[in-house]
Amino acid sequence: MSRPSSRWVSRVATLVAGALFGFGLALSGMVRPEVVLSFLRFSDFGLMLVMGGAVAVVMVAFWTAPKLCQAPLLGGVFQRHPSVWNRDTLVGAALFGVGWGLSGVCPGPAIAGLGTGNLDLLWAFAGIALGAWVQGWRADAR
């Protein structure tokens, strides 16, 4: 496959995967902050089934894909990416969790939520953008 057509196929695959992901988030209700907050208050466990099902499907795919395919369908190689836990990771995870708990908004579902017409999520995006900017500024200052 030539380079330009490979790039095109990769972009289409990314678009389709993103649309499928967004549709699943919208269908599950995860794009509505009030649903997420009721899950975090342990009053609605529907999202636990959604997240648990997603984790199960991904785990099966990550274990079986390298055994069934010689290489990823869109090129490259299968490889492991070891996680590095340090203070910055811990602080970032804590800030993310506090923000998610206070607002009921996670960045991925928020993008899908905009697609459903929930423009109030733009306020959450302003906070996400500010946090990303501060983190980048802090990283550059080091």
Image (tube, rainbow, N blue to C red):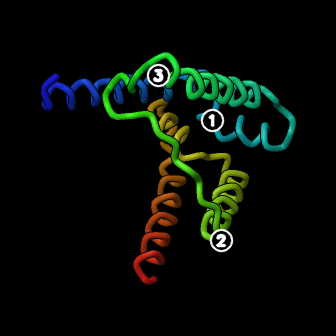
**What whole-number distance in Å separates the C-alpha atoms at marks 2 and 3?**
34 Å
The first of marks 1 and 3 along the sequence is 3
Question: CB of mark 2 within 8 Å of CB of mark 3?
Answer: no
**What whole-number distance in Å separates the C-alpha atoms at marks 2 and 1?**
31 Å
Q: Nearer the viewer, residue 81 or 40?
A: 81
Secondary structure at badge 1 equals: loop
**Mark 1 — residue?**
32
In the figure, is residue 91 to the left or right of 64? right
Q: Which amino acid, mark 2?
A: Arg
Residue 53 position, x and y percent, is: 69, 23
Q: Which amino acid, mark 3?
A: Leu
Residue 87 - label: 2
Tell me if residue 83 comes above or below residue 112 in the rendering. below
Residue 72 - label: none
Q: Which amino acid, mark 1?
A: Arg
Image quadrant holding the N terminus, namely: top left
Q: Going 76% across and 31% down the picture, which residue do you hit?
A: 48
Tell me if residue 16 comes above or below residue 95 in the rendering. above
Residue 52, quarter of the rendered image: top right
Mark 1 vs mark 3, foreground winner is 3
The first of marks 2 and 1 along the sequence is 1
